[in-house]
Image: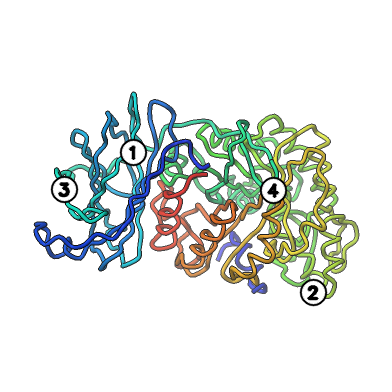
Amino acid sequence: MRLVFPDFRSRRARAASSAGAAAVIAVAAASLAFVPVAAQAAETRCQATYAVQNDWGSGLQTSVTITNLGAAWTSWTLGYSYAGNQTLSSGWNGAWTQSGKNVTVTSLSWNADVPSGGTVAPAATFTYSGANTAPTVFTVNGVVCGGSSPTTPPPTTPPTTPPPTTPPPTQVAPALHVSGNRLVTSTGATYRLLGVNRAAGEFACVQGKGMWDGPADQATIDGMKTWNIHAVRIPLNEQCWLGTSDVPAGGVTGTAYQQAVKDYANLLVANGINVILDLHWSYGQYTGGGAGCSDTAATCQKPMPDLQYAPTFWTQVANAFKGNDAVLFDLFNEPYPDAANGWTNATAAWTCLRDGGTCTGIGYPVAGMQTLVDAVRATGATNVIMTGGLTWTNDLSQWSAYKPSDSTGNLMASWHSYNFNGCVTTACWDSTIGSVAAQVPVQAGEIGQNSCAHDYIDQVMAWADANGVGYTAWTWNPWGCSSNGNVLIADWNGTPTATYGQGYQAHLLSQHP
């Protein structure tokens, strides 16, 4: 298998609320014998939650999360009515149609089956003028979520045209800063970074394959927007950015690499998507515990950033993006100096993480997080900075005690969580990650599971949602989930992979940043 997944091979050793309205129409509806679709309708019991993710005065983005409280559904049709002049613009996660004030959403092939206790979350955008009153009556398969039949049921004829796929209207991504334990916008509104990783910038160049190993254009971003993605984490290669001689022929390097990163980041921001730039692959030979390669060049994940190139890399990146606080800096992907010292001295590993220098088991001079924070701030950049913990940043147990100082106060913690990590239970998250999240913002820069299911990330997201933690899943690349694991899409248009991608997409569509 080609060397594009260091996060999986090298880690095997380690085991505001919107200003819009929200209405919850909850409940268990009794079966209605007179409904014509008797077989399924008689079994239907449902809960519906209507939420407005964004309201810009002349339009809105909304979702309706419907929960099956009865027998399993093999298909579903959601119906509701508006009181005002709301007019459907586009919809996703279901086939949306409108007749007058009545709105109908029918299931798609991939989300038609809903088990008892399962949920689906169709979402759409509408234009309107005047009042924007939330609907109060919802039906599923002709049965009211609330126990009574609607006086005038909405139309249930399936549409004859394909479901709309137009993404929501574009607004520029917000500038962000840290306030206490929250990320906030310039107006002080709490904002969580919810989205995906877009891999390739770390490996394609150094493998002589160009830049992105696939498109990085408006069409692919339009696909992201239909998932309600508001953040994209972009892994980068230190030597490709700097244009060192280690980058082989065919690889994009130096000025061309820098421009490609700037162009993609700026396009994402213009489309309302915040960007996290991550130093993923770096220089320095390492062959100890957890090593992903024996190369000196930046061809895999190393245990710590190197002093030779990393400070210069971050000085240049900071200069390129200072003044654009919609872009965040993740200083180093997944530190593991504790594995490098044989797990023998946690204090030394945490000290190495912060201070760098000569670290046990690492044969090159190390740049600690304090050195990299200082390099960024020396440029005058105020962008939010993320720093990780130990054990491939799955361990934040001593993050607060060893965090670097930041003159701007715009520092947050980076956490990664996969099903094959050591800290994989809510009890562990409560005792380690939760204590950090009570003090500073925490971003789960990578979440995933190598089984192509979503049962583990469902637990991570539920905990993160309850604790104000953001997350970006691995990965928005169509590499085939069954062979690689943790792959969200089947093509660059954003078609979700079975189970893993579908589950993550459905959850994002139910969330607001």
**Discs 4/3, front:** 3
Residue of label 3: 156
Residue occupying the point 34% across, 28% down: 131
Residue of label 1: 134
Question: Where is 432 relative to 366, above or below?
Answer: below
Residue of label 4: 330
SS at circle 3: loop
Q: Are marks 2 and 3 in contact (CB under 8 Å)?
A: no
* Kind of residue sitting beneath label 3: Thr
* Kind of residue sitting beneath label 2: Trp
**Discs 1/2, front:** 1
Q: Mark 1 vs mark 2: which is more N-terminal?
A: 1
Measured from the top left, where is residue 391 in percent x and y?
A: 72, 66
In which quarter of the view is residue 379 placed? top right
Q: Are marks 3 and 1 in contact (CB under 8 Å)?
A: no
Label 1 Cα neighbours within 10 Å, binned few <14 / some 14-19 / many ≥20: some
Label 4 Cα neighbours within 10 Å, binned few <14 / some 14-19 / many ≥20: many
Residue occupying the point 66% across, 31% down: 324
**Discs 3/1, front:** 1
Quadrant of the image for the N terminus?
bottom right
SS at circle 1: loop
Residue sitting at the far right? 358
Q: Mark 4 vs mark 3: which is more N-terminal?
A: 3
Task: Indicate the colouring scheme.
Answer: rainbow
Q: Mark 2 vs mark 3: which is more N-terminal?
A: 3
In which quarter of the view is residue 8 placed? bottom right
Question: Where is 194 relative to 185, above or below?
Answer: below
In this rendering, position of residue 251 left or right of residue 160: right
Q: Are marks 2 and 4 in contact (CB under 8 Å)?
A: no
* Kind of residue sitting beneath label 4: Asp
